[in-house]
């Protein structure tokens, strides 16, 4: 009995220990809670609103819970058997209350969530006093396990890194050459999926210059952890200067070179003075099987080796 009592006491301290442990992580910067653009800011505001709202619900529930424990505890002074008579069966008032309150909670959470989701489907509006700018279109194409960023306006392409101007919306047109991935730049906003044979659109914007981390947030095989990239947010002037240098100094991205880059595996940072959009568009149904056709034999070999390993593991 004594051992059981001690064990229960230690288990009771577990929630407190968890709180203290998490508070020690407060020194670590959480990127999603440090927004650097209007899209990330709107999502941050929604997260904070939801947290405060749910915290209020928790406080009310635990306050009522504590009240009931104290008021109707078995060993309270002057307790009588007739004191506890909830009379809940058929109580219309109580039933209406516990039905209406959840509806109110869902509505108060749904309205700002749905409003924010619809707002994120269009380019961020300029701040007060600033002129509206056309979004910079960037085709973000993923392949196992690398990123291709095509700038049709500048007619350049980068591999595994990205330059964007600040204070201008970026319209990412997302697609995949093979497996499904998801483009995510936590400091600028949430993720959206890249899929073969179709195109999804993601609007982001950076208000502050800096270098931000981007990655694939959808697990897609052995190279998933290394499928990352850097985002360089800079002034419009610096961005234009960089784009002009790439256009004048980088080699052309030929179809043969692009096919080599599409081979499953990792690669380093690269720049090209043309884009692959001139000869293949992975977001179309016609080109969705492009990689499979190019590397069918390699995929067959990997599948064969996988089957051998699987059989050996069962022996």
Image (tube, grey):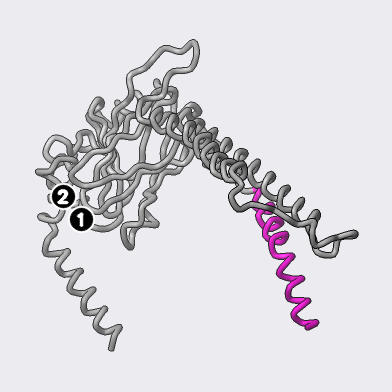
The image position of residue 144, as x and y in percent, is 27, 54
Which label belongs to residue 259?
2
Q: Residues within 10 Å of mark 2 (few under 14, many from 20)?
A: some
Label 2: element kind: helix
Q: Which residue is mark 1?
A: 263
Residue depicted at 41% across the width and 44% down the height: 214
Bounds of the magenta span?
Answer: 1-27
Q: Predominant secondary structure in magenta? A: helix
The picture places residue 150, in percent across and down from the top left corner, at 25, 35
Across the whole image, how many numbered discs are drawn on residues?
A: 2
Foreground: 116 or 41? Answer: 116
Q: Is residue 187 above or below residue 26?
A: above
Question: Element under label 1?
Answer: loop
Residue 173 showing in the rendered view: yes
CA neighbours of label 1 inside 10 A, class few (<14), some (14 to 19), many (20+) = some
Q: Nearer the viewer, residue 284 or 6?
A: 6
Quarter of the rendering containing residue 190: top left
Quadrant housing residue 168: top left
> Can you see residue 238?
no
| Disc 2 + disc 1, Cβ < 8 Å | yes
The question of residue 173 being in magenta is answered with no
Residue drawn at x 67%, y 52% as measured from the top left: 87
């Amino acid at each position: 009995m004594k051992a059981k009592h001690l064990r229960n006491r230690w288990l009771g301290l577990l929630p407190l220990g968890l709180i203290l442990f998490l508070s020690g992580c407060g020194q670590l910067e959480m990127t999603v809670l440090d927004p650097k653009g209007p899209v990330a800011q709107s999502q941050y505001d929604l997260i904070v609103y939801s947290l405060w709202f749910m915290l209020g619900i928790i406080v009310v529930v635990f306050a009522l819970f504590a009240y009931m424990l104290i008021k109707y505890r078995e060993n309270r002074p002057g307790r009588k058997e007739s004191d506890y008579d909830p009379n809940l069966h058929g109580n219309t008032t109580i039933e209406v209350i516990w039905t209406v309150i959840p509806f109110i909670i869902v509505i108060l959470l749904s309205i700002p969530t749905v409003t924010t989701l619809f707002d994120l489907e269009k380019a961020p509006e300029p701040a007060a006093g600033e002129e509206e700018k056309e979004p910079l279109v960037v085709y973000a194409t993923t392949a196992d396990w690398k990123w291709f960023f095509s700038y049709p306006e500048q007619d350049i392409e980068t591999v595994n890194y990205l330059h964007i101007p600040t204070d201008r919306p970026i319209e990412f047109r997302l697609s995949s050459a093979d497996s499904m991935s998801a483009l995510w730049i936590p400091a600028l906003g949430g993720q959206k999926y890249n899929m073969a044979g179709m195109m999804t659109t993601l609007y982001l914007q950076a208000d502050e210059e800096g270098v931000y981390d981007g990655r694939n947030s959808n697990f897609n095989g052995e190279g998933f952890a290394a499928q990352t990239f850097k985002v360089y947010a800079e002034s419009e002037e610096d961005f234009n200067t960089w784009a002009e240098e790439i256009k004048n100094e980088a080699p052309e991205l030929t179809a043969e070179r692009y096919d080599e880059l599409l081979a499953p595996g990792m690669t380093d940072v690269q720049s090209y003075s043309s884009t692959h959009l001139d000869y293949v568009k992975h977001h179309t149904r016609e080109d969705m099987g492009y990689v499979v056709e190019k590397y069918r034999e390699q995929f067959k070999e990997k599948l064969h080796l996988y089957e051998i390993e699987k059989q050996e593991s069962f022996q």
